């Protein structure tokens, strides 16, 4: 079979060269063929009163929604409930992303609530700009240097997620904080989780800091022992009993973790040096190379969806399920059904949430590597059939 495919490909390349096409043109042609598939149907359309996965999605001011790698959830806002969409404002490109927030009552129409965790344009701005001075004015110069190390135009600020903390009546954002180091110009050499807080989902959020998270226990085989406690793609989950968790990819993207948060949701419940595996955190699927984790609970069962690790390119998703968060996780396999199921309908997971009527919704990013701000959102209905989480393609649909 392999030899046959190889022959076919060689024949296609030869034919293209004989016709005077370059191999690059052939690739483009193949790319266009892929774009003719149903998953691209909506590219030139605009979302209005129904979901149009992959279409342009404008906010109420007519500007493209900038909330990539984000999360949608229904949370208390000023004595009522609203849908809050938090994400990466990618207008700055790959680095220096502010964290944006949008609000909605119907999930189709979104009001821009502002860039709520902002990146200062320079170190001086932390002292001179009234917006940043109001947030960080009380910090020492060394603390300001640390804030600028996390929030600066060259920093990676990805996959922001927000929780409402009932105890403190405030809002907490966690995000993947990364960037190059003096030793390595690779943009993902830091591998930490950043945390910021605010009294309003519309900010301004104040950065508390960033840190490494749980570590591989000494009696288990660490897939990346030279760099302990890494946190990259991450997500938050609030359980029905009020406990909150962060799930993240660690060990150089080889192993997923889930760690319980403290009561303020601003850090782990236990210092990584003292945390007990199976009690305070769990290490999952060592070496499986999963990222973009999404954790949820439906009818008492926990589900953890993730992607493989191919950068901006889409790949096959997988779901695991468990009856207890720190219990045994079972592999359900690929949750997607139908055509393009093996590339998750050309998306990467970032959020799965429940609408008011009990309809669950998958939100994935269709990254556009060549024009990151024009990356699109794909929202699809989620079903739970016989305890299995499934996602199917719809060119257009309504949740209500
Ligand atoms: C993906 C990750 C994204 C972004 C991208 C950069 O694997 O999920 O959030 O970091 O890599 O290549």
Image (cartoon, rainbow, N blue to C red):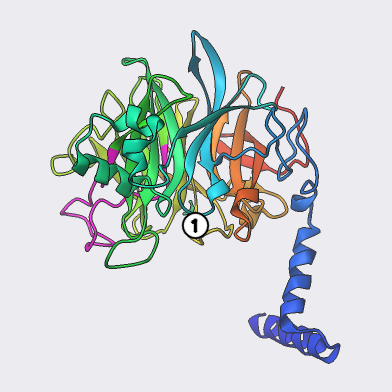
| Label 1 within 8 A of ligand 1 by Cβ | no
Q: Secondary structure at mark 1?
A: loop
Q: Is residue 212 magenta?
A: yes
**x and y, in percent, of residue 237 in the image:** 41, 31
Residue picked out by circle 1: 308
The residue closer to the viewer here, 80 or 237, is 80
* Most distant residue in the top direction: 79
Residue drawn where x is 76% and y is 49% of the image: 43
**x and y, in percent, of residue 145 in the image:** 25, 46
The residue closer to the viewer here, 193 or 14, is 193
Label 1 environment density (alpha carbons within 10 Å; few <14, some 14–19, many ≥20): many
* Most distant residue in the right direction: 19
Q: Give the residues in magenta.
A: 209-235
Q: Quadrant of residue 118?
A: top left
Q: Is residue 315 magenta?
A: no
Tally the numbered discs. 1
Report if residue 95 is visible in the image. yes
Residue drawn where x is 66% and y is 85% of the image: 3
**x and y, in percent, of residue 287 in the image:** 36, 60
Looking at the image, is 62 positioned above or below residue 308?
above
Looking at the image, is 297 positioned above or below residue 231?
above
Residue drawn where x is 29% and y is 52% of the image: 230
């Amino acid at each position: 079979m392999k030899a046959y495919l190889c022959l076919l490909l060689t024949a296609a390349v030869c034919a293209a060269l004989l016709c005077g096409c370059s191999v690059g043109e052939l690739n483009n042609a193949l790319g266009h063929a892929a774009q003719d598939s149903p998953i691209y149907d909506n590219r030139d359309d605009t979302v209005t009163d129904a979901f149009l996965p992959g279409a342009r999605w404008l906010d109420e001011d007519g500007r493209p929604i900038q909330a990539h790698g984000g999360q949608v959830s229904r949370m208390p806002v000023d004595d009522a409930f609203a849908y809050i969409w938090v994400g990466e404002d990618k207008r700055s490109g790959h680095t220096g992303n502010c964290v944006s927030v949008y609000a909605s009552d119907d999930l189709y129409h979104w009001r821009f609530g502002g860039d709520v965790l902002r990146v200062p344009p320079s170190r001086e701005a932390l002292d001179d700009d009234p917006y940043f001075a109001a947030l960080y004015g009380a910090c020492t110069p060394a603390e300001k240097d640390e804030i600028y190390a996390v929030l600066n135009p060259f920093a990676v600020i990805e996959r922001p997620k927000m929780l409402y903390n009932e105890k403190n009546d405030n809002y907490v954002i966690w995000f993947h904080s990364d960037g190059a180091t003096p030793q390595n110009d690779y943009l993902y050499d830091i591998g930490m989780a950043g945390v910021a807080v605010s009294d309003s989902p519309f900010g301004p959020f104040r950065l508390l800091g960033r840190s490494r998270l749980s570590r591989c226990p000494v009696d288990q085989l660490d897939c990346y022992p030279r760099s302990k406690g890494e946190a990259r793609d991450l997500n938050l989950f609030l359980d029905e009993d009020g406990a909150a968790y962060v799930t993240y990819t660690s060990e150089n993207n080889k192993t997923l973790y889930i760690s319980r948060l403290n009561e303020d949701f601003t850090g782990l419940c236990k210092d990584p040096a003292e945390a007990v595996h199976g009690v305070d955190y769990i290490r999952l699927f060592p070496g499986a190379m999963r990222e973009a984790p999404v954790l949820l609970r439906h009818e008492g069962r926990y589900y953890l969806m993730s992607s493989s690790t191919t950068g901006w390119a889409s790949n096959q998703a997988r779901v695991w399920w468990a009856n207890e968060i720190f219990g045994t996780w079972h592999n359900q396999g690929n949750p997607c059904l139908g055509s393009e199921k093996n590339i998750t309908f050309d998306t990467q997971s970032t959020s799965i949430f429940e609408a008011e009527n009990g309809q669950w919704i998958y939100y994935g990013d269709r990254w556009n590597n060549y024009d990151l701000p024009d990356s699109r959102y794909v929202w699809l209905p989620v079903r739970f059939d016989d305890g299995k989480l499934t996602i199917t393609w719809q060119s257009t649909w309504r949740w209500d």
